[in-house]
Amino acid sequence: MALSTTGLAHAQDTAANGGTLPQVEVKAEAGSPVKVEQSANPKFTAPLLDTPKSVSVIPEQVIQQTGSTTLQDALRLTPGVTFGAGEGGNSAGDRPFIRGFDSQSDMYLDGIRDVGSQTREVFNIEQVEVIKGPSSAFGGRGSAGGSVNIVSKTPKAENFVTGSAGLGNAKYKRATLDVNHVFTPEVAGRLNLMVNDQNVAGRDAVQYKRWGIAPSLTLGLNSPTKLTLSYYHLQTDDMPDAGGFPYSNPFAATNANASLNGNGSPMVPNRRNYYGLVDRDFQKTKANIGTIDLSHDFGNDLVARNTLRLGRTTNNYLWTQPDDSKGNPLLYGTLWRRTNSRAATTDTVINVTSLTGKAKTGSVEHSFNVGLELSQEKTKRGSYTLSPNTNNPLTGSTSCPTTGAETGYNCTSFENPNPYDPWSATHTVTRTDPANDVRVKTKTQSLYAMDTLTITPQWLINGGLRYDHYDTQLHNPTAAGTPAAPKDLQNKNGFWNYQAGVIYKPVPEGSIYLSYGTSSTPPGMDAGDGADGLSVAVQNLKPQTARNVELGTKWELLDRQLAVTAAIFKTDMNNARVTAEDGTTQNIGKKSVKGFEVGVAGNVTRQVQLFGGYTYLDAKLKNQGFSSGVPSADNGNVFPNTAKHSANLWANYQPIAGLSLGLGATYVGKQYGNTANTKWIPSYVRWDAMVSYALNKNVTLQLNVQNLTDKLYFTKAYASHYAAIAPARTATLTANFKF
């Protein structure tokens, strides 16, 4: 199947944040390109070619061709996106960094914020849209890097049954089913199912199990008034591979053992080593999301819409963090098994009311979207306690001169760990009292207006304005109730954000634009389930603000079959939260990212399709405040979790009817885990390949080999303790069917 031209990632930028979504038809025929000419998000009020914003769109076809099964798999197809790790204070789950900024709390499902920490699947995804740069005018509070919007599958006006069944190495087993049925001309339903069970190639003990179901029903399919009811459930039960390997420089420069330090890269005696414990570690998540989407078309391009969503996500885990920078591997050849845990539940209620239409004032044509968004998010957060604790009982500390049963199996060999040590025989794990859970409640009321003005066929102006009233409160029942440790914290703010762009179209197939956008990141914006929680130090601070200036161009070439984009940009945050000279936290820090990116997607010939891009990021910490009363030594360093160079290219070749050959290459440069730039993971090149053959019109066999050269590389760098390792060579054979 050919890839999209208009509307594919990098090439035909698509919207991500906020708002409600019209139904977008995506049609494909063998040997012909997929066309998506309008973003699924009504806040993007112009065709994608004329949208003055860098957005990467990953279509379902590319997700399927590359064998991606999770959202993180899919996002790796977009250069400029890297990933951060989690632990106990910052939840383990999807944590993309976009253009150098943490975007864990900037995840959207069908344009509506999806705040609960989780590991997301692709079985119900139509496409993934990554908006880049500050864009709070579209989605409200958010990071300076951008956001991710997942577009769900919805009922269509045709009957079909599609699905897949796959097997692979590392005990990979996966099956999906997608059924769409038209009951009457006005009523259609769709059901998506998935079950997945696998180990991880090249890793001991790791196992991922999950299943999901997503039914939806549309009433009034071909009438002015349309109602879509949908429900999404995903459940996981994993032996998580979160901890990875410790860095080689655990000792401070003043430590007596500092001479043992390595260069700061991860230490890997054997890529298979799993330092966790099978009878202790776990990660279990659930996502339940229900949506009621009602719209009415008044005619003359005027559509009113209301979307109500209720959601609950839970994230429960306890997993091993290897050695916690204690230095046992270098001192004794052993490793201390520290634990991270979380028991979190997030409930959301969000309602979005919008009006989309076209109008004319004199000779100027308007395409607009205005709306009101009301949301409430509640998070309860506890953890797990271990008795006895994870200290070495022989030393009463985290020091591990020896290993084995005498240490309570809290110490293990660095070279040859045993993940099946009988730890639970002498220990208990208890969920903390739910009455003592930290509770966070966030309420937001937002008004927004977006408009694209067509001055002449060659000149367009895009504008957007949004106001958010934001109120987040945290209650900690176990706090002392003192000024230094209050039980209750609150941050209340109101903030405006803007989006503006000028577009020049020298020909209908091309555009050149200059755009400006802003973002606001208030304290506690993650609703207590990410890396940006409320604290005494930050509760009274103003939102961090960022601005982005971008000059770009988009073209549809080769009879509009191949789309290419290019952009240069500069993002500045001038009031980042850092430690001031007096030891308090203030909005005085500065961060800056400048770079450029290029993208390509579509058909070079009828048989050859390309999908890919390149991103360059020069991300500098201009002012990190003070440390012990003197300017921070980190001033001028590189952003953590940010690669200066990243690129990917996926090529699909159809030499004869029914046969497709795919080859992909991904390059990600060196990434630092911390602001001091002393802990890091190296650059890597990963190759992937695919062969698919249609046995008949209904069944296609597809072989995917990911990490073709069996490259040892790391995907995430935590700030201080560990780096997460990637799977080894993985091969899967899938039978895809359609009727």
Image (cartoon, rainbow, N blue to C red):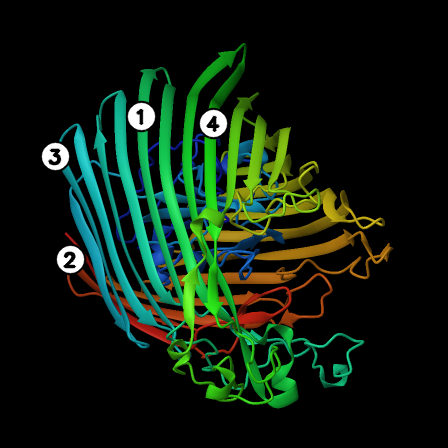
Q: Residues within 10 Å of mark 4 (few under 14, many from 20)?
A: many
Residue 331 lies left or right of residue 667; in this view the side is right
Mark 3–mark 2 Cα distance, whole angstroms, equals 23 Å
Residue 699 lies left or right of residue 369; in this view the side is left
Q: Quadrant of residue 238?
A: bottom left
According to the image, label 3 marks what residue? 183
Q: Residues within 10 Å of mark 1 (few under 14, many from 20)?
A: some
Label number found at residue 78:
none
First in sequence, mark 4 or 2: give its number. Answer: 4
- 53 is higher (above) or lower (below) than 359: below
Label number found at residue 373:
4
Q: Considering the numbered disc 3 on the image, is that residue within a helix, a strand or a loop?
A: strand
According to the image, label 2 marks what residue? 698
Instruction: Inspect the image, locate mark 2, and give the three-letter code of the amino acid beneath it.
Output: Asn
Q: Considering the numbered disc 4 on the image, is that residue within a helix, a strand or a loop?
A: strand
Label number found at residue 294:
1
Residue 33: tell me if it is visible.
no
Question: x and y percent of residue 519 in the render?
Answer: 63, 37
Check whether the beta carbons of the residues at disc 4 and disc 2 lie within 8 A of each other. Answer: no
Tell us which disc is closer to us: 1 or 2. 1
Question: x and y percent of residue 565 in the render?
Answer: 55, 47
Q: Considering the numbered disc 1 on the image, is that residue within a helix, a strand or a loop?
A: strand
Q: Residue at x 71, y 81 (%)?
A: 261
First in sequence, mark 3 or 2: give its number. Answer: 3
